């Protein structure tokens, strides 16, 4: 029998998750939050904002050389985004598992993108500890996080 405390001695982590404008527009806010909650992760910050294009470019700065960058930033700034910080053991990696892969058509059933999206992929999640830290700092002030 696995002893949780022994096997998963990892520290609590934080990750940044955003429901993109297409996810908000499709009415998927509660469905997505519910999946993270049911797994046992803890919501420590949330707000709804319409990002400016400049802000979208900052958020996706790693992708600025990619051909789809401009379209991506237009789409990301086209309406309300639900920005969140989730806490939990392994939440960065497991959050990505809950989300599925980038292309919804290739995402497994059971994942958010696999179950709920066909073309636009409705959600963003930090892809590692460095991006999680950067994205949380970009979107939230420290005092906006519940401890
Ligand atoms: N994207 C796209 N075309 C691509 C790859 C990515 O339009 O070929 C968009 C898509 O919305 C994706 C976002 O750019 O979610 C960020 O890309 P990334 O590779 O970081 O994928 P993610 O981390 O969201 O799975
Ligand atoms: Mg990414």
Image (spheres, rainbow, N blue to C red):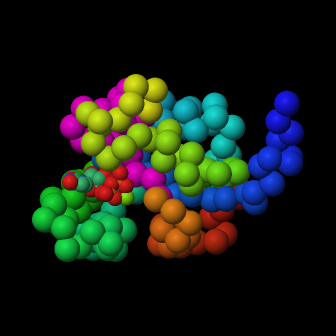
Percent position of residue 95, x then y: 53, 46
Please say whether residue 120 is one of the residues in the magenta stretch.
yes
* Ligand 2 occupies quarter: bottom left
**Residue furthest to the front:** 1
Residue at 13% in and 65% down: 67
Write the start and end of the magenta stretch as one range: 112-126
In percent of the image, x 56 and y 66: which residue is there?
Answer: 129
Left/right placement of residue 65 relative to residue 93 reads left
Against 124, residue 131 (above or below) is below
Q: Is residue 107 magenta?
A: no
From the viewer's perspective, is 90 left or right of 2? left
Quadrant (top left/top right/bottom left/bottom right) for the C terminus = bottom right
Q: Residue at x 69, y 37 (%)?
A: 40
Position in image of residue 39 (x %, y %): 64, 34
Q: Please say if 121 is above or below 88.
A: above
Residue 58 locus on image (x, y percent): 34, 74
Q: Left or right? Give the position of 135 relative to 45.
A: left
The N terminus is located in which quarter?
top right
Q: Which residue sits at x=61%, y=50%?
A: 91
Asked whether residue 25 appears in the rendered view, the answer is: no
**Which one is in front, 74 or 64?**
64
Q: Is residue 24 above or below residue 126?
A: above
Give the quadrant of residue 13.
bottom right
Q: Is residue 12 visible in this depiction of the protein?
A: yes
Nearer to the camera, 46 or 35: 35
Numbered label tally: 0
């Amino acid at each position: 029998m696995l002893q949780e405390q022994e096997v998963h001695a990892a520290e609590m982590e934080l990750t940044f998750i955003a429901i993109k404008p297409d996810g908000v527009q499709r009415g998927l806010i509660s469905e997505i939050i519910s999946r993270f909650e049911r797994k046992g992760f803890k919501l420590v910050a949330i707000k709804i904002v319409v990002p400016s294009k400049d802000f979208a470019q900052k958020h996706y700065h790693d992708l600025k050389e990619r051909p789809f960058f401009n379209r991506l930033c237009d789409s990301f700034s086209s309406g309300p985004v639900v920005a969140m910080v989730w806490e939990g053991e392994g939440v960065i990696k497991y959050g990505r598992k809950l989300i599925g892969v980038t292309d919804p058509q290739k995402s497994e059933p059971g994942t958010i993108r696999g179950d709920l999206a066909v073309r636009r992929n409705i959600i963003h999640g930090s892809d590692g500890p460095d991006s999680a830290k950067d994205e949380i700092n970009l979107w939230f002030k420290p005092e906006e996080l519940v401890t």
